[in-house]
Amino acid sequence: MSTLNSDKDNPVVEQALRDGELHKALLDHLDAGIYMVDRNRRILYWNRGAEQISGYLAQDVAGHFCQGDLLMHCDAAGRGICGKGCPLSSVMFDGMSREHVFFLRHRHGHRIPVQVRARAIYDSAGAIIGAVEVFEQLTAPAAIDRRALNEHGCLDPLAEVANRAYGEFKLGQAVDIMRAFGIPFGWLAVELNDVEKLERGFGHGLVDAAVKMMARTLDSNLGPLDSVTRWGRTEFRIEVHSCWGQGLGDLTAKLLALARASNLEWWGDPVRVTVSIGGVMAEPGDSSESLESRVAGVLAKSRSARSSQGADGPSNNVFLKLGDERCLP
């Protein structure tokens, strides 16, 4: 908590918090993230749930503006909402509650899907003096699954997702299930761009940090039955369970947008890390080998499209038969 004399509303809000130490203690023990801001959107309170979800400690954010370089909420298309779309600004303008699904930026740079609820805070005279936001992670942390994978030698130690041996086994299982029961699935390939350039400019350590950040962004934004595997040093594969062509395309576009919206800080400086993504739908005659061959071909198209368009060029969103293939640079 910080005393902020520059805003006449701050003493009112801070006194209310001091008068409610019991309520504050209760809020600190909730799993949901909760934070309060004054009329200027300066953060006055940040509970332990917010610390655990975002990675930012209360002392890191107290006194900072929520529209600064902290959570940097974005939508599924990667568009920032800290301007006109900010729910805290909206509720303080008209007093009407808001509820949204956004993607916050974790302290380590990756994107996490959260359900956000914003409410106005009133004083005894009925004037709006601030706002409160409650946010909850939409995908449950996979700590138990990671623990199980680690115990059996199936976890990649850097990315903390499945290693390739386990991923290949899971792919074979998905093919067998499709053949036996007709349950479709998608197979995505994700690759970090400009790895050699990043290594020359920042060293091997940054590339490892980028791999870890990207693994967290991917793993946090998949369905409960989907799985991500570290396939190579800077490559991932994702099995998308029980999907169809358009659904796979929509997920691919979302992952690409969130990957672009992730932000890696290296010794205090922001470093842009991007990916190329290719995706194919499994076909009845597919094997593990044919799927991997097809997705590698689409990923190559994605890299080629990116080279011709430039790093900031538009994505190629065309589905390429056979298999509703999609490549996104």
Image (cartoon, rainbow, N blue to C red):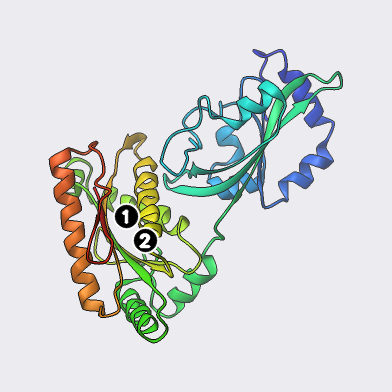
Is 146 or 115 nearer to us in this picture?
Answer: 115
The secondary element bearing badge 1 is classed as helix
The reply to whether the C-beta atoms of the residues labelled 2 and 1 are less than 8 Å apart is: yes
Residue 134 vertical placement versus 249 (above, below): above
Which residue in the protein does label 1 denote? 211
Q: Residue furthest front?
A: 321
Is 204 or 80 nearer to us in this picture?
Answer: 80
Q: Amino acid at mark 1?
A: Val
Query: Residue at the location (62% across, 20% down)?
Result: 40
Q: Amino acid at mark 2?
A: Ala
Q: Tell me residue 125's x, y (percent).
A: 86, 18
The secondary element bearing badge 2 is classed as loop
Query: Residue at the location (47% across, 38% down)?
Result: 74
For residue 313, which quarter of the picture?
top left
Side (left or right) of 53 relative to 279: right
For residue 187, which quarter of the picture?
bottom left
Does the rendering let one see residue 20? yes
For the residues marked 2 and 1, what is the alpha-carbon distance in whole angstroms?
Answer: 6 Å
Which residue in the protein does label 2 denote? 159
Q: Residue furthest right?
A: 124
Q: Tell me residue 288's x, y (percent).
A: 26, 78
Does the rendering let one see residue 263? no
Q: Residues within 10 Å of mark 1 (few under 14, many from 20)?
A: many
Q: Quadrant of the N terminus?
A: top right
Side (left or right) of 30 relative to 74: right
